[in-house]
Image: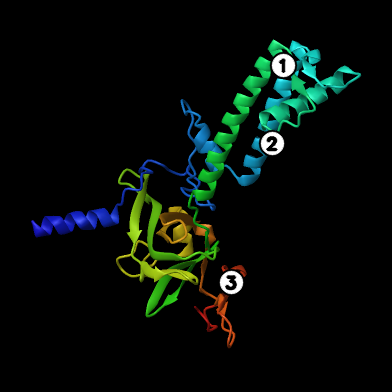
Amino acid sequence: MAILRRKKEDLNRQAPDLGFGTLLGDEAERFITRDGTFNIRKVGGRGYYAYEQLVEMSWMHFFLLVVAYFVGVNLLFAIGFGLIGLEQIGGMQHNTLWGGLAQAFFFSVQTFTSVGYGAMHPTGLGANAWASFDALVGLMSFALATGLFFARFSRPVAKIAFSSIGLITPFQEGTSFMMRMVNRRNNHLINMEARMMLTWLGRTDDGGRKRQFATLDLDLNRISLFPMNWTLVHPITADSPLWQKTADDLRDMHIEVLVMVKGFDETYHQEVHARASYLFDEIQWNRRFAPMYRSVPGQPTIVDLARLDATVPVEAKGND
């Protein structure tokens, strides 16, 4: 039983299930994009989920959508007041149709936001009913907007920056694959864990190619605190799928190194995740990462985020 258990563990380590499958070939450009999202596009029957889109879109798009909604809804209500009759809005002063619609628009804004300056007010039954519906839509809209603002602010998002390049460089008595990362925010990330995997197109017995996966063992896969940068190191030993591979070999294999990181965010009190990947042409050879930090006597240690990709030749000293 112990032997079978060890064989099963070895099989799981060599062929982890990442959920991408093994049938993807040359047509798959990469599995994980540079911004950490999956390079997957779903078509045919994919539903639209407004909450998902509103929470995950960028802040600029969100604010533009809120402004467009605010203007569009009040414009529709202004047109409704015009169809009912602008004479049913007391205190309105206008000489042209466009002037009346403009004042109806601002009257809708006052009703929608419950400001109610008192200069204009509905007088007829139709205008009162339409204004009541305007106020109801305004109350519901502000309730939804408040919930969306809170959901966006309270959603934990890891701002972990990964180096744009990976390195194959000397390490101890052999070589290794290295990449590094840094937390761009000033919050505290603790109990960090990292996992690194390799995927490539391997040759099959019938001369075809099949997607394969393997776990890349790390020299250090956990740290308790993440105040500075963290360099992940995979020692290239005889057990590594990168063993004795040249740059041309990696290009022919169409490799992609997948990096997955998770940790606990003390600000949000939740676990956060981040991902990155490196293709064969994003790997440099015989270089080391240059230090990102410098010490100033009597001052806090400075971590220069702009030096995340800084490297030096292997002959030079100064690997952090």
The residue sitting at 29% across, 66% down in the picture is: 239
Question: Local crowd at mark 1 within 10 Å, few (<14), some, or many (≥20)?
Answer: many
Report whether 132 appears left or right of 245. Answer: right
Identify the image's colour scheme: rainbow, by chain, secondary structure or one colour: rainbow
Q: In the rendering, at what x and y percent does residue 275 appear?
A: 46, 55
Q: In the rendering, at what x and y percent does residue 135 appear?
A: 64, 25
Q: In which quarter of the image is residue 96?
A: top right
Question: What residue would you read off at disc 2?
Answer: 67
Question: Local crowd at mark 2 within 10 Å, few (<14), some, or many (≥20)?
Answer: few
Report whether 275 appears left or right of 58. Answer: left
Is 34 or 292 nearer to us in this picture? Answer: 292
Question: What residue would you read off at disc 3?
Answer: 310
The residue sitting at 52% across, 79% down in the picture is: 314
* Residue 72 appears in the picture as rendered: no
Q: Nearer the viewer, mark 2 or mark 3?
A: 2
Q: Residue 253 carries which label?
A: none
Of the residues under marks 2 and 1, which one precedes in the sequence? 2
Is 301 or 77 nearer to us in this picture? Answer: 77
Q: Residue 80 carries which label?
A: 1
Looking at the rendered structure, the secondary structure element under dot 1 is: helix
Looking at the rendered structure, the secondary structure element under dot 2 is: helix
Name which residue type carries label 3.
Answer: Ala
Cα distance between the residues tagged 2 and 1: 20 Å
Is 188 or 30 nearer to us in this picture? Answer: 188
Of the residues under marks 2 and 3, which one precedes in the sequence? 2
The residue sitting at 81% across, 13% down in the picture is: 87
Question: Local crowd at mark 3 within 10 Å, few (<14), some, or many (≥20)?
Answer: some
Cα distance between the residues tagged 2 and 3: 42 Å
Q: Nearer the viewer, mark 2 or mark 1?
A: 1
